[in-house]
Image (cartoon, rainbow, N blue to C red):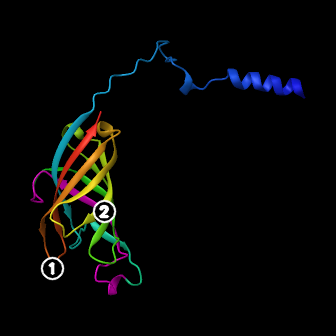
Amino acid sequence: MFKLLLILLLVTTTTTTLAQQPYSFLQGQKLAPKPHHEKLTHLRFFWHDIVSGRSPTSVTVARAASTNTSSSFFGQVNVIDNPLTEGPAMASKLVGRAQGLYALASQEGTALLMAMNFAFMDGKYNGSSITVLGRNMVFTAVREMPVIGGSGLFRLARGYVQAKTYAFDRKTKNAVVEYNCFVFHY
């Protein structure tokens, strides 16, 4: 029994995984780390939250039993696939989509929990995304939310976004929000 344990101990201490190997198995050369130069990127675009009409980009998927009697619509959850455009007009150049959800998360006042990815579809950032997760006090002039990550050119992103309502239609409840993103990435 002791010999078996000793053999198992020797085998497990000499076995390595691919992740532990400092060499590329394809080329047999040592992998050199790339120098990391963190950059700050500022992006500005407009987020179109369309809740009315034939093709809404924001749809309610859940409501609490008390949502309709709540002055803040507490408990409502919307899933979004909102256009991101270069300018405030819907007809301006499409640069990406905001995909995720927001929930009305305050019993007093109107505050949203925002969880969304800005998925870019144009230019240098095509295929890359920025992830935002935070509290949005919608009736505050400028709201700040954290950037918690990203993909593609925004891999390991961190930073913040500032949201400012550009237009809100009280009848349709559609909104246009200007976003300024300040993102550190490699």
Q: Which mark is residue 34?
A: none
Q: Secondary structure at mark 2?
A: strand
Q: Magenta span covers which residues?
A: 67-91
Q: Secondary structure at mark 1?
A: loop
Q: Amino acid at mark 2?
A: Arg
Q: Is residue 139 left or right of residue 118?
A: left
Residue 164: image location, x then y, percent? 15, 60
Q: Residue at x 74, y 23 (%)?
A: 11
Examine the structure image and report whether residue 145 is included in the region drawn in magenta. Answer: no
Q: Residue at x 38, y 77 (%)?
A: 63
Q: Please name the residue that numbered disc 1 is placed on.
A: 171
The image quadrant where one finds the C terminus is top left
Picture layout, residue 160 above or below residue 168: above
Q: Residue furthest bottom?
A: 69
Picture layout, residue 18 above or below residue 121: above
Residue 75: image location, x then y, percent? 37, 75
Q: Please name the residue that numbered disc 2 is placed on.
A: 135
Q: Quadrant of residue 13?
A: top right
Looking at this view, is 111 or 98 the one in front? Answer: 111
Q: Amino acid at mark 1?
A: Lys
Picture layout, residue 17 above or below residue 138: above
Q: Residue furthest right?
A: 1
| Sequence-wise first label, 1 or 2 | 2
Picture layout, residue 31 above or below residue 73: above
